[in-house]
Amino acid sequence: MTALRNDPAAIVIDWGTTSFRAYLTTDEGKVLGSLETGDGIQSCAPGGFEQLLLGRIGIWTEAHGALPVVALGMITSRSGWVEVPYVRCPAGVDELAAGVKEVALANGSRMIFLAGLTDPTRLPFPDVMRGEETQVLGSGLDRDRTVVLPGTHSKWAEVEGGTIRRFQTFVTGEQFSLLTRHSFIARGMQPAGEADWAAFERGVRTIEENPAEADAFLSLIFSARTGMLAGELQPAEIVDYVSGLLIGLEFHQARGAGWWKDGDAIEIVGNDGLNDRYARAARLLGLEVREGSGEAAIAGALRIAVAAGLVKAPAMA
Amino acid sequence: MTALRNDPAAIVIDWGTTSFRAYLTTDEGKVLGSLETGDGIQSCAPGGFEQLLLGRIGIWTEAHGALPVVALGMITSRSGWVEVPYVRCPAGVDELAAGVKEVALANGSRMIFLAGLTDPTRLPFPDVMRGEETQVLGSGLDRDRTVVLPGTHSKWAEVEGGTIRRFQTFVTGEQFSLLTRHSFIARGMQPAGEADWAAFERGVRTIEENPAEADAFLSLIFSARTGMLAGELQPAEIVDYVSGLLIGLEFHQARGAGWWKDGDAIEIVGNDGLNDRYARAARLLGLEVREGSGEAAIAGALRIAVAAGLVKAPAMA
C-alpha cells in the first residue's frame, strides 16, 4: 500500500485573473509536481480555456493518463470558463461538494469547477469568496475557531460545527498597494529593502494607542506624510509604517465588527507572504496566534473533490 | 476714487505640484486677469523658479510695472522655491502675516511666500495645510463656525475668535481617485457621464444606515463589488456610489472626531468642483449648509499681504 500513497490522483488548478497554477497531487494532497504561468483568465480568449489547460497539463497527463482535474479561483466566475453559483454559509464539505459543476475534457478527463462561498448576512450586500474556502477546509473544519486569511482581499472566517459559518472581507492588501504605488505616500517614501519591523510595529501601535484616530481612517492615513514633515518618520520607514498601520486597522475594524476580543486566539492561514506580518500584529495586540499551513488550498480542494465523487477517498493511514 | 478700485494692486500665485496659476487682482481681490499652465513645481528645475515666474507674469508687469507678488501652495514647501515654516494654530491674519518670507525679484517687485498652518494638537502627528488657510481667511474669520474645504485632501477647520483654532485633514478625494482608477472597483465599473445623484445618495445613505459597517471601512468599500455581484448596483452606478460612500464616510468619521452633531451647521468653501457633492451629503445627514465662495483664496491671500505690509489696505467703501 505504501507505493500507492505517492501515486498521482488528481490535478488541482488555481486559475486567477493574472496567473495559472497547477499541482499534480496524491489523493492526500501531497504535491508531486507544480507549474505556474502568467496565463491568467484576463489574457485568455473566451473559448480558449480548454486548449490552454490541456497544453499546460500535458506533461502530466501524457505520463499518467486522464487524471481528474479540480479548478478553483476566478476561472469559476462570470468572467471565467464555467460560472459556478456561490454556496451559502453556513457550509461544510458536503454543501460545497454539492455546488460543483462538472465538464468532460477532450482528453477523457473529468473536470470539476468548485463553487465559491457567500455570506448572505453581511451588510449592505452579501459578502463573497472564491478559492479561499479551500484554504479554510484544508486547514480543517473539525475545530471551532476564527481563521484569518491575509491577502489582497483578506478574509476573516468563523469555523463552527464542521462548517464555515460566516466570513468578512477586508481589502487591506489592495489599500496597501494603492497607497504605496499611486498616492501621496508613494511620492514621499523610499523603496524598502528588508522589512523594517520596528517601523511596522510602530504602525500597529499607532492604531492601538490612538483608537479615536483609528476610527477616522481617511484622516489617520495622512500620518504617513505628517510623520515625515514632523521628522518622526524617515522616508525609508514609510512602507513598513503604512503596512503596520493598515494591518493594525484591519484588526481594529475586525474587533469592532465582533471578530475578536482581548485574549482570544486566531489561526492564520494563507500563502500570500503576509502571514508573518499578520502574526506579528496579532501578538502585539494580545491575541494568541496559531500559524496554519500555507499549502492548505490543495488539501481543501481535494476534500471537496472526494466528497463530489471525482477522486477516490484516500486509504486510512 | 472709483477708478482706483479697478487698478491692479498685486499678483497672486497659486503654485502647486502640477500646476501654476496666477491672478492679477485689485487691492480688494477683484480678479482682473488670470492664467493657468502646467508648470508645476515638480516640472521646474530648482533654480529656475524666478525665471519661469517672471516670464509668465511679464504680460502684466510690462503693462502695470513691478507689482507685488504673493505666492502660496507647494512653492512654499521644502520641495518648492522658498520653504516657509508652518504657523501654529490658533492663528489669524496677524500670525499668518508674521510668518511670511520675502524676496526681491530681478524686476524690482517685492514677493512674499505665505506660511502654511499646522495644528500641533492632532494625533499621532501635527496636521498641516498649505494654501487652504487662505480660503478660510477669504471666507471670513469674523464668524465662529466650522468650515469644510472639499478636495484631494479635504480639510475641516474651526474658526473661533478671529482665528483658525484647529483643523483636520481627510484624504477622501485621493481615496476616490485611487479606488476608481487603480483598484478592483476600476475594473468593474463603467465610466460616468453626468453625475448619477441617486447612486451618490445611495452611497451616503449606506453609511448612515449601517454605522457598524461604516466603522469597518476596509470591509465596507468591498460593497462596490458585492453590490454588483448581488445585482443591486449597476456598473454605470459605481462611480457615484463610491463617491457617496467616501464622502459619507468623511462625514461619519468627522462626526466621530467631534466636528459635528445632529442639527449643526457647516460652511463649505472651495474650488475643487466637489462643493455640490459635499453640500448634498451634508443635507442628507441633517446638517445645515452654508455654501461659501469658491474664490476665497485670492481675497485671503490679499488680507495676509496687506497685514504683512506688501499691499496697501483698500480704501473703505
Image: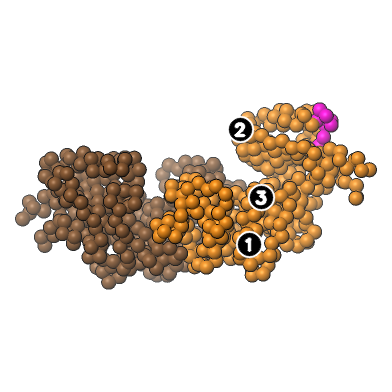
Chain colours: A orange, B brown
Q: Are marks 2 and 3 on the same chain?
A: yes
Q: Position of residue A157 (x, y in %)?
A: 68, 57
The quarter of the image holding the N terminus of chain B is: bottom left
Q: Position of residue A197 (x, y in %)?
A: 57, 56
Q: Which mark, by number, is residue B164? A: none
Q: Label 2 is found on which chain of the structure?
A: A
Q: Is residue B279 visible?
A: no
Q: Which residues are magenta?
A: A61-69
Q: Which mark, by number, is residue A129? A: 3
Going from the N terminus, do you reach mark 3 or mark 1 first? Answer: 3
Q: Are marks 2 and 1 on the same chain?
A: yes
Residue B305 is one of the magenta-drawn residues: no
Vertical relation: B11 (above or below) A212: above
Marks 2, 3: nearer the viewer: 2
The three-letter amino acid code for the residue at tag 1 is: Ala
Q: Position of residue A90 (x, y in %)?
A: 73, 57
Name the residue at 55% across, 45% down: B184
Q: Which mark, by number, is residue A282? A: 1
Horizontal arrangement in the rendering, residue A163 relative to residue B301 (left or right): right
Judged from this view, the residue extending furthest toward the bottom is B161
**SS under mark 3:** strand
Horizontal arrangement in the rendering, residue B145 relative to residue A1 (left or right): left
Q: Is residue B4 visible?
A: yes
Asked if the residue at tag 1 contacts the one at tag 2, i.e. Cβ–Cβ closer than 8 Å, the answer is no
Q: Residue at label 2? A: A43
